Image (spheres, rainbow, N blue to C red):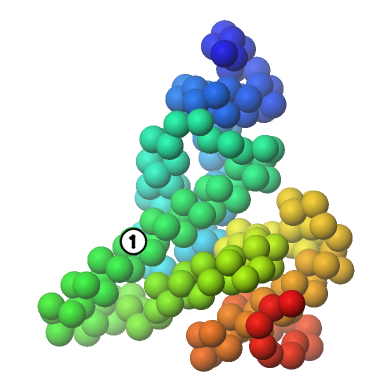
Amino acid sequence: MTDRGNINGDFTTLLAAVREGDDEAFRRLYERLYSELRRLAHSVRAGYGAETVNTTALVHEAYLKMAPSGALDARDRAHFLRIATRAMRQVLIDAARRRQTRAKHDPDLVAHAAQGGVDVSFDVVALDRALITLERIHPRQASVVECRFFAGLSVEETAEALEISPPTVKRDWRIARAWLAHALGGTAAGGGGGDPPPGGAPR
């Protein structure tokens, strides 16, 4: 067991304690990364077009999702942030499912939401379902989407986080965007940037 007297120490010590299921170390690690987690939450909200969960609430809800899980097998800082990204995605998906369920029983919900500036027509559940399918087909490409689209990382930052080369990131990003666009029947995730890649399933 990690010495609890050392959990105020460096990041590596905190991370080791978190892997052992130390709740206090997890809390301190989350506090240390709070500014990065807020930036991450902002990017994830933008990726899903989410207006119903604000940035601060999303950071807090992700904490609650991650904290009860016991030992968190995060290898390093980048891996921890990727785990947090997934927790934030799940918070938004849960909120979207609740909103869609309410819409079925309340025909005025869409009109009221539109008046408040909330877009309930953006199908975040479909986007998440497509990404889950992509994770089964090509896990690395799904991770690139997670880093680039949801976490807002640059090509270089994504390459470092996934331990692959920048050209591989660019190639995976192009192919994954095209696949998601085909799966969703709309515009590729993340908008423009680069030549349109060929369609079809990721390679």
| Quarter where residue 4 is shown | top right
Seen at 60% across and 46% down, the residue is 81
Q: Foreground: 57 or 180?
A: 180
Residue type of the residue flagged with mark 1: Asp
- In the current view of this chain or complex, which residue is farthest to the front? 137
Q: Looking at the picture, does residue 22 appear above or below residue 35?
A: above
Query: For the image shown, how many numbered marks are present on the structure?
Result: 1
| Quarter where residue 139 is shown | bottom right
Seen at 39% across and 56% down, the residue is 91
Counting from the top left corner in percent of width and height, residue 162 is at: 74, 54
Q: Looking at the picture, does residue 179 appear above or below residue 125?
A: below
| Quarter where residue 109 is shown | bottom left
Counting from the top left corner in percent of width and height, residue 190 is at: 62, 76
Q: Is residue 135 left or right of residue 121?
A: right
Counting from the top left corner in percent of width and height, residue 35 is at: 57, 43
Counting from the top left corner in percent of width and height, residue 17 is at: 58, 22
Q: Residues within 10 Å of mark 1 (few under 14, many from 20)?
A: some
Check disc 1 and report the residue beneath it: 94
Q: Let me know if residue 149 appears in the view.
A: no
Q: Let me know if residue 142 appears in the view.
A: yes
Seen at 53% across and 35% down, the residue is 72
Q: Looking at the picture, does residue 17 appear above or below residue 123?
A: above
Q: Is residue 26 left or right of residue 192?
A: left
**Quadrant of the frame with the C terminus:** bottom right
Q: Looking at the picture, does residue 29 appear above or below residue 195?
A: above
Disc 1 secondary structure class:
helix
Seen at 39% across and 61% down, the residue is 92
Q: Foreground: 22 or 29?
A: 22
**Quadrant of the frame with the N terminus:** top right
